[in-house]
Image (tube, coloured by chain):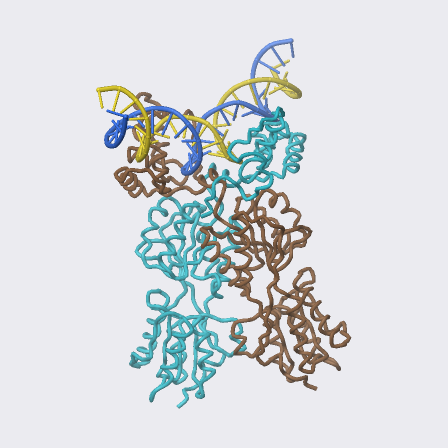
Chain colours: A cyan, B brown, C blue, D yellow
Amino acid sequence: MLDGTASGPSAAPLAGPPDRPHPTTGQRTVAETARHSETRYGNRPTMKDVAARAGVGLKTVSRVVNSEPGITPDTERRVQEAIEALGFRRNDSARVLRKGRTASIGLVLEDLADPFYGPLSRAVEEVARAHGALLINGSSAEDPEREQELVLALCARRVDGLIVIPAGDDHRYLEPEIKAGIATVFVDRPAGRIDADMVLSDSFGGAREGVAHLIAHGHRRIGFIGDQPRIHTATERLRGYHAAMADAGTTVEDSWVSLGSTDPDRVRAAAEQMLSGPEPVTALFAGNNRVTVTAVRVLAEQERRVALVGFDDIELADLLGITVISQDAAAVGRTAAEHLFRRLDGADHAPARVELPTTLIQRGSGELPPAS
Amino acid sequence: MLDGTASGPSAAPLAGPPDRPHPTTGQRTVAETARHSETRYGNRPTMKDVAARAGVGLKTVSRVVNSEPGITPDTERRVQEAIEALGFRRNDSARVLRKGRTASIGLVLEDLADPFYGPLSRAVEEVARAHGALLINGSSAEDPEREQELVLALCARRVDGLIVIPAGDDHRYLEPEIKAGIATVFVDRPAGRIDADMVLSDSFGGAREGVAHLIAHGHRRIGFIGDQPRIHTATERLRGYHAAMADAGTTVEDSWVSLGSTDPDRVRAAAEQMLSGPEPVTALFAGNNRVTVTAVRVLAEQERRVALVGFDDIELADLLGITVISQDAAAVGRTAAEHLFRRLDGADHAPARVELPTTLIQRGSGELPPAS
DNA sequence: TAGGCCCTGGACAACGTTGTCAGCTGAATG
DNA sequence: CATTCAGCTGACAACGTTGTCCAGGGCCTA
């Protein structure tokens, strides 16, 4: 891939053959200088160059760069000038190699573009920043294989820690990594077949509350449209749905439940099916934000007024009057990141499972009575 | 913490098998054992360990790991077994140091949580992934200093390339980095005082079209609420507004224009002010997605029906009937990333400036006639 | 004035990987 | 049978930084 051999992107400044710029001219010193100052793949000055220019030792430059004590103001000034003049910037790759810590953490989520993950990753980033760490980010696109590939790539980079929103349900591949010291926190969904820290939202409780809310407003025929059953939150929410229905003594008909991809076409088909026929549902519970969005579109086209409660809040949901079960994505991200850094700071208690509560926000769509 | 770099006299001569401590020196045995068996910060096996276990040379392991040709199937199997048994994973930090390329690119944007940047960074990530590169991500929070800090941190990591959504207006600090070979593409807003690649949306043209649309529907008193004038897109959009108004021969009153933070409170105040008084505006042009959201809220509370066109599309805007100037965030990100990788692949033409067109999407709010 | 101590700076060896080059085997060829 | 050749393998030196240890030199104290 990027593995291109030595030849850098800059073709112009290369005077001689790339492998051995050994000019035949008598000006050996010039050639020497040229090689020193402008070869090297990225053509960047190193501490050695700075040291030479400032007339000090290599380690002295290192000391200045790291603000270590024991440097004469005069020496420091000379070194700073050389750094300035050469445009030197410390190579953190080398530093990392030497020190063992990369000051970066990896975040693997499902889709950076999903509005639920924006605030989450922003929150993680803020915490990381407060700890002086950078964030390396990747989307699994809900593909377990891609998740593993990403996670292992991050491990190879030797990130200090990982925050993973799992796509797969078997994370034993992470065992050696965790044992080797890469702190890991799972978020939003539990880790599979492995004992690890996790931070979750109360999917079961939230869904149960949302469905109970519909029941309290008189509904019995309630449809549930959720994500693929492979996804833990999807089944948890379905479980919540069933629990609430059972609490109300209602028998759930198969045709009321649809699990599968959140692709708008599928969701639309599922919703339209539930809403048609002799005994249509009078209310819908949408299993996540994407489903909610499509559901809102479908319901807007219906003649009857159908009640709706969605899991996850949505921007502008207040204007559209959509009742939702809200989970605080930023809080989830922040909690996970703080947990991670506590681990990195040495906490070594047993893996913890944190569950954050959800909130029912009434905005109208969930309070509609059943339309006959 | 674990910085067990105990060095001391490196007693193990390369000749002897590393896994067997020499019993010759009685006193040093303890330290030796400790060092060998359990130190090393992350305590991870290295190629050396794998080589020892497989009974082959270090370089052979490297060959296997990199699928280089010329390895006997039998040797390969032995090495693979050792890798498996030890849970070895190549340390990419060291690899990077040796090879000079990090196979990662940096993306500095304004706010990961902003719905405009989600699709953008997802698009960048997809392209990066196709090129085998990872994405390091940071938010500048619209703070020039923080932008610089982030960018330079990424340069220190030696990312191969940078995609920057500028917060500041002076990027000369990047000159040495670019010269040193870090390809850079500026996105959404132009680079300041520096010649570089950039990918922009046609803010001027888009705003002009949007305002002209309102004018075509009979409006003359049109308010403009935009972001801080420091931000290039904000002033470009304002310029588009003025151009459209001038085209229509309308004189813009000062009270119709408000630039400043996109904080909801400020936007709300600005909107309410324009909508009150003896001669209120009959239409609003919102300078970006955040402004639009607040404007929609304010307008929903008004008695009169006020027309609205917003810059940037918004999720569910179709349901709310909001007319917008849409810019394709994913296309912007994709274009920028492709440009970047073309640079990394050796393209060395003069810095290019790409401007992507915007689209007017009519949904109702922009087609309302002026209310008297 | 001599001895010791701090203060500054430099030489050197890691960190874990890859590129280079030379050595070793076994087989094929004269 | 000797010789070449090719295919494998390993020793070694980088990459750029930091930790350790030691050497001067100046200054203070006895």
**The C terminus of chain B lies in which quarter of the figure?**
bottom right
Residue B143 at x, y = what percent?
63, 55
Q: Is residue B284 above or below residue C23?
A: below
**The N terminus of chain B lies in which quarter of the figure?**
top left
Residue B320 at x, y = what percent?
55, 78
Q: Nearer the viewer, residue C21 or C7?
A: C21
Q: Is B127 on the left-hand or right-hand side of A166?
A: right
At horizontal 37% and vertical 78% (from top left) the residue drawn is A270
At horizontal 47% and vertical 65% (from top left) the residue drawn is A114
Point out the residue furthest to the bottom here.
A372
- Rendering quarter of residue A241: bottom left
- How many circles with numbers are drawn on the protein? 0
Q: Is B42 on the left-hand or right-hand side of B247?
A: left
Q: Is A13 on the left-hand or right-hand side of C15?
A: right
Q: Is residue A188 above or below residue B175?
A: below
- Rendering quarter of residue A281: bottom left
Q: Nearer the viewer, residue B167 or A29?
A: A29
Residue A330 seen from this side: no
Residue B365 at x, y = what percent?
60, 80
Residue A140 at x, y = what percent?
41, 58
At horizontal 60% and vertical 44% (from top left) the residue drawn is B177
At horizontal 49% and vertical 63% (from top left) the residue drawn is A113
Q: Is residue B364 above or below residue B176?
A: below
Q: Nearer the viewer, residue A84 or B358?
A: B358
Residue B255 seen from this side: yes
Q: Is residue A203 above or below residue A278?
A: above
